[in-house]
Image (tube, rainbow, N blue to C red):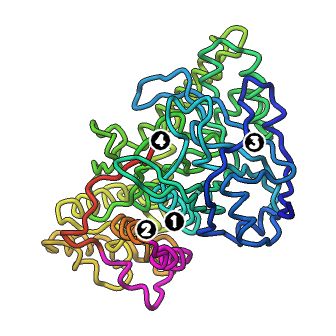
Amino acid sequence: MTLNIPFDNTYAQLPPQFYTRQAPTAVAAPRLLAFNSGLADTLGIAPSEEAELAAVFGGNQIPEGAEPLAQLYAGHQFGNFNPQLGDGRALLLGEVVGTDGIRHDIQLKGSGPTPYSRNGDGRAWLGPVLREYVVSEAMHALGIPTTRALAAVATGETIWREGALPGAVLTRVARSHLRVGTFQVFAARGETAALKTLTDYAIARHAPDARGPMGLLRSVRDAQVELIAAWMSVGFIHGVMNTDNSSISGETIDYGPCAFMDVFHPNRVFSSIDRAGRYAFSNQPEIAVWNLAQLATALIQQYEDPSDAVEEATEIVHAMPGLIEAARLRRLRAKLGLLTEDADDPELITDLLQLMTEGQADFTNTFRALMDAEARDQFLDPSGFDKWKDRWLRRLEGERDPEAVMARANPVLIPRNHRVEQMIAAAVAGDLAPFERLMTALARPYEPLPGFEDLRRPPSEGEVVQATFCGT
């Protein structure tokens, strides 16, 4: 073994009820599909041969210093509490402190069954692995807090879902994999000592200036506020905002049935399992508040008298809707070239979004087209937009360099759903060229790159993706 990963593990030093130690399950024929060399440099991982990278990140070899384990957590899934979930197809290899000074988890996803698999096979197929690779790296390039993709490895094995599919393993990097559900499991069990230990660990790792459990709650709230506002500014729909998918660090985590909107509609849902629309686009701020309330409920269980913390927890949670709306408005103002604030801005923004809904306008392209006077072409009937535009231009008077502000706030490219699906289909057929092309283009999403104009195009009628799937 020559691959050097400078592990510096802390989660593995927590009490044993936090996880189950186990090695990944070896695969038949690991083959490296993608490796993020830039991220590897940040993590201090030295270059290595492809075969060794495939063996390590496919789960066939455990690098020196790794302490593989499956983490325990609970969670509310579509509002229903499940008292024990945990990593059913993932293993934390360990942690490194990168050249950026940040501690990062390195996790294999699709590495085989664990005690938390609930009769599942613990594996992943190629489609969701490449989807998460593309979308998480695109989110990073967009400047949105997110887990990242370090490697994708084909396993040479068949995975059975709706049929026979090629297997793969994703290596995911995160500031941590602590979730709201990590706190919920110990609160539900009445394991107060473990809950206190977890709280202290989370504070030390993510909020060193926080004072006690309520300080941590406030820190998580503020991180989630910015995250949700960022999602809303690019038309991103997570799809499964369960509390076990709500990260304490404020990163986007678990790209299952996620999607980006093409035609704007506030109630858009893509996730095939979100039948009631709980996690629709416009509901995401409300769900983030709901999830924070579940964290607050868990955290106060460690107080000798929980009533001592109820008032402060209530204040922290109740402030969140206003903070999200303020952050959302700040980002949407920037998309319109506005840095100053005006009392009429919320109405100006709401009216544009309503016109986009009625006119079936593409979310990403409409905002970007405001820069070159072509936005009216996005609307079935542009007459309403023309009137709105006059109001907007009057509002822009006196703003400094609005085009530069808009260029930084409005991406040219997003990972459009139909392009992701086309990429997956090609990869299953053995062609990685569309994957590599998407990765090249989406690494610079705010630049109008020559040769990638086709990736800006919304789907044709026959290309529209109506639903997305989690892949488990």
Element marked by disc 1: helix
Specify the quadrant that holds the C terminus: top left
Which disc, if any, is residue 415?
2
Q: Nearer the viewer, mark 2 or mark 4?
A: 2
Q: Are marks 2 and 1 in contact (CB under 8 Å)?
A: yes
Nearer to me, 29 or 124: 29
Q: Residue at x 52, y 57 (%)?
A: 129
SS category of the residue bearing label 2: loop
> Between disc 1 and disc 4, whose residue precedes?
1
Q: Secondary structure at mark 4?
A: helix
- What is the quadrant of residue 378 in the picture? bottom left
- Going by the numbered disc 3, the residue's amino acid type is Pro
- Looking at the image, is 336 positioned above or below residue 115? below
User: Label 3, on which residue?
Assistant: 68
**Dot 3, crowdedness within 10 Å: few (<14), some or many (≥20)?**
many
Amino acid type, residue under disc 4 in the picture = Gly
Q: Which residue is mark 1?
A: 134
* Spatial separation of the CA atoms under disc 3 and disc 2: 32 Å
Residue plotted at (68% across, 63% down):
54
